[in-house]
Image (cartoon, helix red, strand yellow):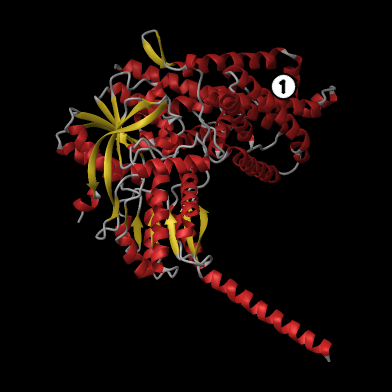
Amino acid sequence: MNDWSVLVGIAFLGVAYGMVLYLISVGLSVTMGLMGFVNLAHGVFAMAGGYVTVTLMNRYGVPYFASLAAAAIVVAALGFVLERTLYRRLYGTSDFDQVLFSIGLIYVSIAVVQHFWGPLTQPMRAPAYLKGIITLGGFEFPTYRVFLIGFSIVVIAALWLTLERSRFGAQIRAAVDNRRMAQSLGVNTGRLFAQTFALGSGLAGLGGGLGADILVTSPGYPLQYILYFMIVVILGGLGTIRGPFLAALLLGIADTACRYFWPQMGAVFIFILVFFILFFRPQGLMRRARA
Amino acid sequence: MAKHSVNRSARAVTALLGGLFVMGAAHAQAQAVKVGFIATLTGGQAGLGETMQKATNLYIKLHKDELPAGVTIETLWRDDTGPNPDQAKRLAQELIVRDHVQMLAGINWTPNAMAVAAFTKQAKIPTVMSGNGAPAATRESPYVIKTSFTVWQACYPLGQWAGSHGIKQAWTVVADYAGGTDAYNAFAKGFAEKGGEIGGSIRIPLNTVDFLPFVQRVKDAKPPAVFVFAPGAAAATAYMKAFDELGVQAAGIKIIGPGDITDDMELQHMGKGVLGIETALFYSAAGDRPANKSFIAAWKKEYGANDDPGIFSVTAWDEAAAIVDAVKAMHGKMDPDKTMAFLSHWKTANSPRGPLEIDPETRDVVHNVYMRKVEMVDGRLANVEFDTIPMVKDPWKEFNK
């Protein structure tokens, strides 16, 4: 095995990991930037996506893609309902109150999940046609990760197109930049928040289902992984969608490379990386252009 | 006058009945032997504690009629949430000081075991450990016996077996904590004795999310074999999936390790990619022993046909047997030193694992170690035993006398 194939292998695994992180975190970046809400409970939606996918597949024999679609839709609906009933009561309150609320939501969801599914991790069994290894250009890659990258690219492209080209996307961008101005121009920000939150949660649910192989589905999920999502969002720059993409890829590749070359440093490395990036660029990798 | 005497008698009878009731309650209380279990009941590794609970509850349910009249066993369960020695020690303290338990039991994870063992030395509480493979726990305190295993008992003979069966070089992949270090040391020693050489070793941090990069490194090095140790059954599934996804066995690299990596509890979730893996362990659900067959039948009757007992189910089962036997022998009065004297000499012919004895010198287990291979039996994956190393004492203690 020459050095080239090692580097390609690492880059590949890192990109797959980064894509999953991005899908889950992009919703958080938009809602935190849009609503200014410190939502530590974002991992709950990714977890819900994982559970829906795995339960539909394992218990009811629903095919893989249908389960993923169901996960995205169910979790989007869940996000919509929670936003309307719980989250909107805390808009404009202090950061501390919002943090307390999200932590409370995390613990409630952990308990609910544990009650219905038990404390064990849920096994994720990819369909047979996605298992095994494929050879691309002389290199061998696990098929599932290739699929992960391809599928994520399609979803991300659809997301970016929506935000750049559609009216809905324009409204979101406007409200993120300057909420008051957008309101005075007739944008119904209340409804916009709910819809955006649903979109972000649905994406997180999709990411949770897709990535159930890497970020395993278990009751402890929201607490275990929130740090990664937060890092992606903070490094990327709140409220942007391209920033977190760069950050997620960077985090995914760097973390994977570190595990390969210096296994013992695995856990520590991300924090050193975050420290240095924020030290030199506290606003994140991509600054949001201000109107 | 008549009314007055009726009132008086009524009062007297009530008082008498009340007194009897209180006496009876106090009597019953004094005869409930409280055993405090510390286990991992939540989080990614909650399977460890869950199976311990299931085994303990089932054994006690099936054998409670053996207890002397009026004596019952009351089990209290506390969650350590994972390898967390400070938490485990605190839970032990609370169980003893607040809940007044007479015995401690269970205990997952080597670091937790060492912390609790140190504590039992001061507290003089008889402790049976079924949840971990720590070799030094019984050395740490004279109040500890183990019904589990030690990591050395499986990994050291495995190293010797590998070296004498044509494997001259191997890489090692272990979880980065005390248990993983023990596994590595044990395997390396046995392997070196038979002329084997360790090509490279990888230690995976406990909170790892994505295992593929580590496994990729092994695959790139292409050793003839890789020795793997995973912390607990759920982690074993994740490790084995990573090996399967990268096609490690298909690339000609033999996977070996202690039976933990193909634990029967999770084996059916690991997929056909684990066929052919050879492991060493004191137990296999496919073991053809009458005691094993009746254990599995009772388990499936209680918990369903799709529920597979594994390593820690059997160790907890034997632990419950030891506790029940001790309670019987002591008639519910668990004097610490007498109880320990009994437990140190405990043996049973009815363990699902085969013959089981506690070595009075070390208070640790002595049992057979079986070489097993993963094969398909009746349409399900099974660890089929193909060789037996009889009555293995803990090698670590033998080397560190």
Question: In the image, B107: left or right of A199?
Answer: left
Q: Can the viewer see residue A244 in this picture?
A: no
Whole-percent x, y for residue B267 in the image? 42, 32
Between B336 and A30, the one nearer to me in the picture: B336
Between A244 and B130, the one nearer to me in the picture: B130
Q: Can the viewer see residue B396 in this picture?
A: yes
Whole-percent x, y for residue B231 in the image? 39, 40
Q: Amino acid at mark 1?
A: Arg
Whole-percent x, y for residue A200 in the image? 67, 26
Tell how many labels.
1
Between B401 and B335, the one nearer to me in the picture: B335
Question: In the image, B94: left or right of A140?
Answer: right
| Residue A168 position (above or below residue B241) | above
The quadrant of the picture occupied by the N terminus of chain A is: top left
Residue reaching furthest bottom? B1
Whole-percent x, y for residue A85 in the image? 78, 37
Residue assigned mark 1: A173
The quadrant of the picture occupied by the C terminus of chain A is: top right
Question: In the image, A17: left or right of B344?
Answer: right
- At x 43% / y 25%, what residue is drawn? B271
- At x 43% / y 45%, what residue is drawn? B313
- Around disc 1, counting alpha carbons within 10 Å, would you say few (fewer than 14), some (14 to 19), or many (20 or more)? many
- For numbered disc 1, what is the local secondary structure? helix
- At x 78% / y 33%, what residue is drawn? A84
Image quadrant where residue A138 sits: top left
Residue reaching furthest top? A137
| Residue B36 position (above or below residue B151) | below
Image quadrant where residue A81 sits: top right
| Residue B25 position (above or below residue A201) | below
- Chain ID for label 1? A
